[in-house]
Image (cartoon, rainbow, N blue to C red):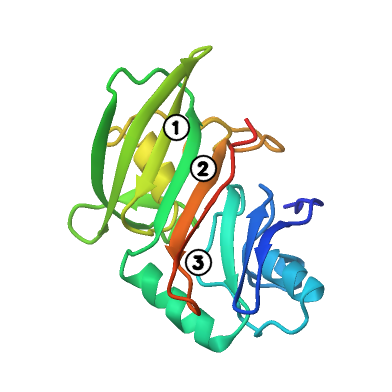
Amino acid sequence: MQQSTDDPIIVYRDTALVVIVKPGGLLAVPGRGIEKQDCVVARIRRMLPGMIEQPAVHRLDMHTSGLMVLAVTSQAHRLLSWQFERRQVDKRYIALLEGIISLQEGEIRLPFRLDPDNRPCQVYDPRQGKMGITRWRHLGAEEGRTRIEFTPLTGRTHQLRVHSAHPLGLGTPIVGDRLYGNGQEGEQMLLHASRLAFTHPSSGEPIAFDSPAPF
């Protein structure tokens, strides 16, 4: 699968961390195989060679665009990871869904797991799945599509994509989603990490970033 040729955009940088906007179509971290080594981490480490070897404290799906934070130092990585693990980071996403959603807001709770026969797809499994929790808010209807703000309370793989598409979620996939919707090869998935707020690992002060969705 062809990677994005666009580089991540650095929106903030200090001695502890870097915040970037990831383009859709670029891996967040390296995958398996030489063809999957081009990623956000590799490109940012080339720009900032003093970073630790594994600076990512969270990930975005390859086809998701938006805000990511990377640690420059080991101490910053430990403290940022602690916040993500304890759900102390405010993460919000903007998505366009393929159909019209009539409700205005809600909370989705769906247990799901990896489908080992159809990787990397996730499947609903009320017995063996792990719970994913997402709050959502209706932002408007646009030409037969619905703009939604998602606030994930858990950080499961493909959580927002599954919660959008599954009949027990919103029942309406994200535009451009090839795994759970009707997206086509080369089409951009319209899911963007639009807000990231956390406590700075060095100063202890709250810090927040916003990135408008490019769609």
Q: Which mark is residue 179?
A: 2
Q: Earlier in the sequence, mark 3 or mark 2?
A: 3
Mark pair 1, 2: CA separation: 9 Å
Residue type pointed to by label 2:
Leu
> Residue 190 in the image: x percent, y percent?
57, 35
Query: How packed is label 2: few (under 14 Cα within 10 Å), some, or many (20 or more)?
Result: some
Q: Which residue was labeled with disc 3?
A: 58
198, above or below 170, in the image: below
185, above or below 22, in the image: above
Residue at x 29%, y 24% (from the top left corner): 104
Q: Looking at the image, is mark 3 or mark 2 nearer the viewer?
A: 3
> Residue 155 in the image: x percent, y percent?
38, 59
Residue type pointed to by label 1:
Pro
Considering the numbered disc 1 on the image, is that residue within a helix, a strand or a loop?
loop
Q: Which residue was labeled with disc 1?
A: 173
Q: Residue furthest bottom?
A: 74
The reply to whether the C-beta atoms of the residues labelled 1 and 3 are less than 8 Å apart is: no
Q: Earlier in the sequence, mark 1 or mark 3?
A: 3
Residue at x 54%, y 57% (from the top left corner): 60
Residue type pointed to by label 3:
His
Residue at x 65%, y 73% (from the top left corner): 14
Query: How packed is label 3: few (under 14 Cα within 10 Å), some, or many (20 or more)?
Result: some
Left or right: 15 in relation to 86: right
209, above or below 59, in the image: above
Q: Looking at the image, is mark 1 or mark 2 nearer the viewer?
A: 1
Mark pair 3, 2: CA separation: 22 Å
